[in-house]
């Protein structure tokens, strides 16, 4: 079998649209996957916007098996044609997040947006993903020097022109993305409340890399400790403590964020959570998955926790599409 990636041909648009609906509809567990997004023109409009940035995956020369439309992501988000994405990174000098977003951020998060620090500049999607997953020591802290970039609009006297701003892994600040999602959702609901357009229900999905998601309430069991250590352990104990605290503190914060968000909007908005835990002990953390890791992910798709989560998402969408006053 030979797989080739090339420009998506115009005559393949209907098949690309069918594959897109089938993939997302199946993922969400819809009873009729091809009915995903109704009669919306999901692929054609994006292809017409930038044909050169629309790619297809072809098997043995002519059989289309998938597509990727990379053009003008932000504009498609505005039209509701594709979801908005926020990649979290962190500024090493300040400890504040730096957000790479394809959607408009609310005022509470806008000051952390990449475009606020680097006006009129942009990064590739792969770069944003790399900056949000820069493993300590494995990946160096990245930097940008605004003073020598003629495209920047930062005034000469602005303190942001004073040198480098190093960006490190977003996990230092928000490893799970729940804090950013909760703050964004609360701001959007406030805006919808002012416009008298509050939705009756909202679904918050958390995809996790281990059996226990970050917003899951603890069981009350004591966490296992470590072995007795010798004197050399004192050299790296502070670093180990900081690393362990990062996960434990963020998990506690995530639980409170979700709980307070539900409390704030109940009973007008029913905020539901669906968790997709990874059934194995820990998910793969490498950038390039091995064949074994890919197989484990595919097998876990049919494990009972994942099947239950898929059914919950499907039930939510079925209820959201039901006529007003009907019972879910």
Image (cartoon, rainbow, N blue to C red):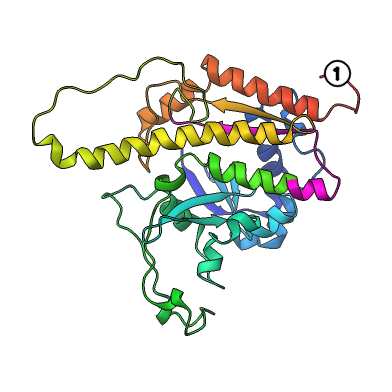
- Can residue 163 be seen here? The reply is yes
Q: Residue furthest left?
A: 231
Assess whether residue 194 is covered by the magenta stretch.
yes
Vertical side of 170 occupied by 226: above or below: above
Q: Which residues are magenta?
A: 190-209
- Residue 57: image x %, image y %? 55, 46
Q: Quadrant of residue 30?
A: top right
Report the residue marked by disc 1. 327
- Residue 311: image x %, image y %? 66, 20
Total labels: the figure holds 1
Q: Rate crowding at label 1 as few (under 14), some (14 to 19) or many (20 or more) other CA atoms within 10 Å.
A: few
Assess whether residue 242 is covered by the magenta stretch.
no
Q: Quadrant of residue 242?
A: top left
Q: Nearer the viewer, residue 71 or 148?
A: 148
Q: In the displayed structure, does residue 253 sit left or right of residue 22?
A: left
Q: In the displayed structure, does residue 290 sit left or right of residue 129?
A: left
């Amino acid at each position: 079998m030979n797989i080739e990636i090339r420009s998506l041909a115009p005559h393949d648009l209907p098949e690309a649209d069918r594959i897109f609906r089938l993939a997302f509809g199946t993922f969400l567990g819809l009873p009729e996957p091809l009915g995903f997004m109704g009669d919306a023109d999901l692929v054609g409009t994006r292809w017409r916007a930038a044909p050169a940035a629309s790619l297809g995956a072809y098997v043995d020369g002519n059989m289309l098996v998938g597509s990727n439309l990379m053009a003008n992501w932000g504009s498609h988000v505005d039209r509701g044609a594709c979801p908005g994405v926020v990649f979290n990174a962190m500024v090493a000098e300040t400890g504040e997040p730096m957000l790479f977003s394809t959607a408009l951020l609310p005022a509470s998060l806008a000051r952390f947006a990449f475009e606020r620090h680097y006006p009129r500049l942009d990064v590739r999607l792969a770069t944003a993903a790399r900056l949000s997953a820069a493993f300590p020591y494995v990946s160096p802290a990245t930097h940008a020097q605004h003073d020598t970039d003629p495209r920047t609009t930062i005034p000469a006297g602005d303190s942001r022109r004073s040198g480098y701003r190093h960006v490190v892994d977003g996990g230092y600040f928000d490893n799970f993305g729940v804090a950013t999602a909760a703050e964004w959702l609360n701001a959007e609901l406030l805006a919808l409340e002012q416009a008298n357009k509050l939705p009756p229900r909202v679904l918050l999905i958390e995809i996790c890399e281990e059996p226990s998601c970050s917003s899951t309430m603890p069981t009350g069991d004591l966490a296992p400790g470590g072995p007795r250590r010798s004197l050399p352990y004192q050299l790296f104990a502070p670093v180990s403590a900081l690393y362990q605290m990062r996960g434990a503190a963020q998990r506690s914060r995530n639980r409170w964020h979700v709980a307070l968000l539900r409390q704030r909007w109940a009973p007008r908005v029913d905020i539901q959570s669906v968790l997709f835990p990874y059934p194995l002990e820990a998910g793969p953390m490498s950038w390039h998955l091995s064949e074994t890791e890919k197989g484990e992910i595919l097998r876990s798709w049919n494990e009972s926790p994942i099947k239950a989560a898929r059914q919950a998402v499907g039930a939510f969408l079925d209820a959201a599409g039901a006529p007003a006053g009907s019972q879910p």
